[in-house]
Image (cartoon, helix red, strand yellow):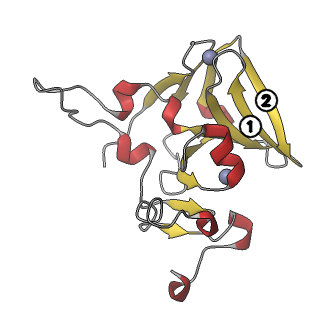
Amino acid sequence: MQKPETITGGCNCEGVRYRVDFSPNHDWERGPLTCQCTQCRKMCGGLIYNLHIIQNSEITWLSKATYAEYNSSAQNFRAFCKNCGSSIGWMDRSVGKEIELAVGTIDEEFLVGDRDREDKPLGAYGVALANPKSHHYYIRNEIQGVTDTVSRQGTRFWRASKEGAMKENEL
Ligand SMILES: [Zn+2]
Ligand SMILES: [Zn+2]
């Protein structure tokens, strides 16, 4: 699996821009995750929200001109752009050391890579950034016949991480 050293990303209007410099001990196993909870769906507008855990020390905010946060529950905050509406990520302030960054905001060159003469993507860091063999949360919200085929790989969680992963016989 090809891993990036540095990536950039941001919202549609570029009012929010960031750079991530991955630490040599970045946790590529735990990093990528998906969530199908209703809050994540409403926030990102998609049925599955792809996130990647980034340490605060790894992220540099190049612009926060239009950055805003929504206090979605207890200690949890959801970052977004108040101009264009892009979802930026999710944070648990009781932990306070990391952000779950919205993978869809990472610049195309890192997700898709260059293209061949027929416009087909040549591939970049998609698997490292959004590995389908990583963690999948809120399996209880799977949409039968639609999202259940996507999150079959990796470790599945009926709800959030604190309740633990599903056991073999529950898969
Ligand atoms: Zn924006
Ligand atoms: Zn969620």
The location of residue 122, given as percent across then percent down, is: 20, 34
* Some atom of ligand 1 lies within 8 Å of the CB belonging to the residue at label 2: no
Task: Check the image and name the residue furthest to the front.
Answer: 145
Position of 123 with respect to 83 (left or right) is left
Q: Residue 78 carries which label?
A: 1
Residue type marked 1:
Arg
**What residue did someone put label 2 on?**
69
Mark 1–mark 2 contact, CB under 8 Å? Answer: yes
Q: Label 2 neighbourhood size at 10 Å, few (<14), some (14-19), many (20+)?
A: some
Q: Which residue is drawn at 31% across and 49% down?
A: 1
How far apart in space, not on screen, are marks 1 and 2 (Cα)?
Answer: 5 Å
Q: Which residue is drawn at 63% across and 12% down?
A: 15
SS of the residue under disc 1: strand
Judge whether residue 141 can be spotted in this image.
yes
Residue 118, located in which quarter of the rendered image? top left
Circle nearer the N terminus (1, 2): 2
Residue 100, located in which quarter of the rendered image? top right
Task: Check the image and name the residue furthest to the left.
Answer: 117
Judge whether residue 55 can be spotted in this image.
no
